[in-house]
Amino acid sequence: MVIYIKFGCNAIRRIPEMNEWTYSDFYLERGGNLHPFDYAKPTSLAEARTLLAQTAADGVVLAGGSDVLRRIEEEVIRPQVLIDIKGLPELRGISFSVHGGLSLGATTTISALAAHNDVRRHYSLLVKASHQLGSLRIRNRATVGGNICVALPQTDLPPALLCYDATCHLLGPEGERTVPLSECYKGTRQTALEPGELLVRVTLPAPAAYSYGAYHTVRQGGQTTVVGAAVLARRASGPSTEWRIALAAAAPYPLRAYEAETHLASAEPGAAMVEKAAELAMRAAQPADDIRASARYRRSMVGVLVRRGIEEVIEQLSGRGR
Amino acid sequence: MKHQITCKINDEVTRMEVESHRTLLDALREDLGLVGAKHACVSGECGSCNILFDGEVVSACMILAVEADGAEIITVEGLAESERLHALQKAFLDHNALQCGFCSSGMLVSSYALLQSVSRPNEQEIRAALEGNLCRCTGYADIIKAVQVASRARR
């Protein structure tokens, strides 16, 4: 087995037979070409379904490409064919109604999401999360569906979507089915999508009468989130507040911190409540050690970020004079 | 597999035959000789290959050439009007916003996109627009200054 370690732009490679590390540029080694594959751009869902069924294991869905093309470049995957789903009208666009909620086509770009007026007004936590996702040029290409389907811990949009109780609509050979986003993740790079299934859109329930969300992260500008926490409070007409907390890069996949949420909903307001909730979130986290941070650092930052988030939300709630 | 694509590059309708696995960056640089967009990290991290794709800044290394069918593309070569440099290019020169110049085309394209949407950006907006564009020699202060100067010069 050849081991690659990627440092920003280039990599060093360990060649076991020689037992040494050598500098490597995958791209130049191949003479400046990606590993060859075919490309198909279906224009109807029927065509897309046929293609997905035909290609099964050898086909990879292409949306924004910021993950897929990078993995091809690094030779982590070698698909036979890329199926570009950007030509499917059913996967495009954002629609909103006060009673029906929000529907996001899977190929909606992060930039388009963050610029949409209804999203800004009623689901502002999605906008905050979008602004923390990669750099502008990534946000201009990366899609809502892609950010979910890569099933990576450090994705920024899913924690916010989890806070809004998002549902994924999957289209397969048997028809369409819905799965709550919280049940979509099976592990890192593993989702509930069956072979041949396609994420068509993500829907969010109607907005609460009032809601406020905060998304705090550890990250350098333009780079991947090292660890992050989304906190959302919702109020219907009464005084009771519903809380949501979801974490980025703190577990094998984006994760809700249910116990911390329950505690916030039931405990006496005050500093002790915030501390306890932050502690419960830390306990829920199952962070990994990797090149960006240690598990220990991540866990301790979960506590800090969740506390900051709750404090920001509480301040905002009290500012409204209840 | 080869594909016939037609796109508009720097205001010129261009037809190309490209392989499925060819990146837009390679097609621009090697097939069309537009070497302004640089080949560097090939993973969307550094900003050296920035181009405008249907009006939005993107990494040309992270897009397949075949995906550009029907798109409108502007590269750094498209900023100047014949012999007259764009205000941004002039400001970059006047204010020493480059040393080795490798990152400059990416910086210029990002700044150009910013000035298309915000005519007088403040420092914060400039920093946000250039986020993720890596410069390894000049530092960013002069670049930000140059963008500010250019935005005033355009009036």
Image (cartoon, coloured by chain):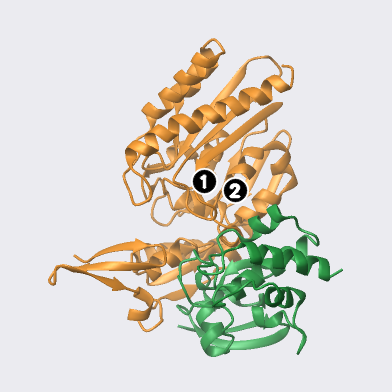
Chain colours: A orange, B green
Q: Quadrant of the C terminus of chain A?
A: top right
Mark 2: which secondary structure? Answer: helix
| Residue A304 percent across, percent down from the top left | 47, 31
Inspect the image, locate mark 1, and give the three-letter code of the amino acid beneath it. Asp
Which residue is nearer to you in this view: A39 or A2? A2
Residue drawn at the location 41% of the way across and 23% of the way down: A280
Labels 1 and 2 touching (C-beta < 8 A): yes
Q: Distance between the residues labelled 1 and 2?
A: 7 Å
**Do the residues indicated by labels 1 and 2 lie within the same chain of the protein?**
yes
Residue drawn at the location 38% of the way across and 55% of the way down: A195
Upstream in sequence: badge 1 or badge 2: 2
| Residue B26 percent across, percent down from the top left | 50, 82
Q: In which quarter of the image is the N terminus of chain A?
A: bottom left
The relative height of residue A321 versus residue A22 in the rendered view (above or below) is above
Q: In the image, which disc is placed on residue A84?
A: none
| Residue B83 percent across, percent down from the top left | 76, 89
Q: What's the chain of the residue with tag 1?
A: A
Furthest residue in direction right, as rendered: B155
Furthest residue in direction left, as rendered: A17
Q: In the image, which disc is placed on residue A130?
A: 2
> In the image, A287: left or right of B39?
left
> In the image, A147: left or right of A312?
left
Residue A233 in view, yes or no: no
> In the image, B120: left or right of A16?
right
> In the image, B6: left or right of A153?
right
Q: In the image, which disc is placed on residue A156?
A: 1
The relative height of residue A90 versus residue A284 in the rendered view (above or below) is below
Inspect the image, locate mark 2, and give the three-letter code of the amino acid beneath it. Ser
